[in-house]
Amino acid sequence: MILLDGKALSNLVKDELKIEVEKLKSKGIRPPHLAAILVGEDRASQSYVRGKMKSCERIGFGSSLFKYDEALTEKELLKKIEELNKDEEIDGFIVQLPLPSHIKENKVIEAVSPEKDVDGFHPINIGRMAKNMDALLPATPNGILEIIKHYKIETSGKHCVVVGRSNIVGMPMSILMGRKNYPGDCTVTLVHSRTRNIKEICQTADILIAAIGKAYFVTEDMVKEEAIVIDVGINALDDPSSEKGYKLVGDVDFDKLASKCSYITPVPGGVGAMTIASLLQNTMTAAKKRRM
Ligand code: GUN
């Protein structure tokens, strides 16, 4: 079994970006600038956004965080997005999800200029991705592609089962793995909460990507010998023995099934670690396209 070390790869990607920033600066070019909009007090969102801003600092990107109270109206948010779309100093920005229920997520996503949509959530970027055209790709799925590439894992002709159909991970992941590309070129099955025989389908997976957001959802009996298992889940479970009172676990029962797999990502230190690195890569790409 080979452990897919997303943490190490993310450090590698960030180091490369840092060198690129230095090169730009030596040519008198301003470093890329990422902005984030955070609405409300969701603890996980606050922590994710903090991580994104800190990573910008580490590699020399500019960063701005715009924090708003839960009561922010949709109209006010759309106005801020329009402002960032027009701001020449900002190369890319994200609106952290989930948003409060009075704000329509799709309306917000569509308002972001596709050129600055470093989350890759805009319908134009999703459409271009589906057609295998140049596009800003969603960060978590793109991070998974980077892991597969880095470890030179063969994907062509394999059966890839994606568990979960979220707009952020499952949906784009299923499209990417089916594209005529490397990584990709798979036969893809997307299973979700309404699928009748999830266990039997997962048992036929050469590549299993778990993104359903339920701790230990994928059990040992669902995975075939030598499968490649990618765990996207980050679930907090009560753990009185730990200092924080909780521990983070994946969607996969790692301890029981790891020895069966040919490759597997750990949690933490697997896919999650790569998500920010991909977002920074997208920001560099957006900056280059806009002004270099
Ligand atoms: N919420 C959970 N993951 C993400 C992400 O990748 N981008 C944004 N904007 N919100 C998220």
Image (spheres, grey):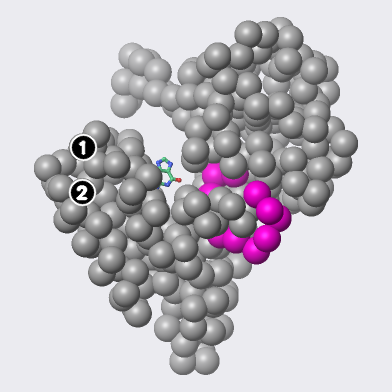
Residue at image position (26%, 49%) is 38
**177, 66: nearer the viewer:** 177
Q: Where residue 51 appears, x then y in whole percent?
A: 38, 50
Residue 283 sits above or below residue 190 on the image:
below
Disc 1 crowd rating (10 Å Cα; few below 14, some 14-19, many 20+) is few
Extent of the magenta region: 130-141
Left or right for 127, reference 151: left
Please say whether residue 253 is one of the residues in the magenta stretch. Answer: no
- Residues at marks 1 and 2 touching, judged by CB atoms closer than 8 Å: yes
Report if the beta carbon of the residue with label 1 is closer than 8 angstroms to ligand 1.
Answer: no
Asked whether residue 161 appears in the rendered view, the answer is yes
Q: Which residue, given by chain and number where applicable, does mark 2 sit on?
A: 74
Residue at image position (83%, 23%) is 226
**Total of numbered circles in the picture?**
2
Q: Which residue, given by chain and number where applicable, does mark 1 sit on?
A: 102
Q: Quadrant of ligand 1?
A: top left
Residue at image position (15%, 48%) is 73
**Amino acid under disc 1:** His
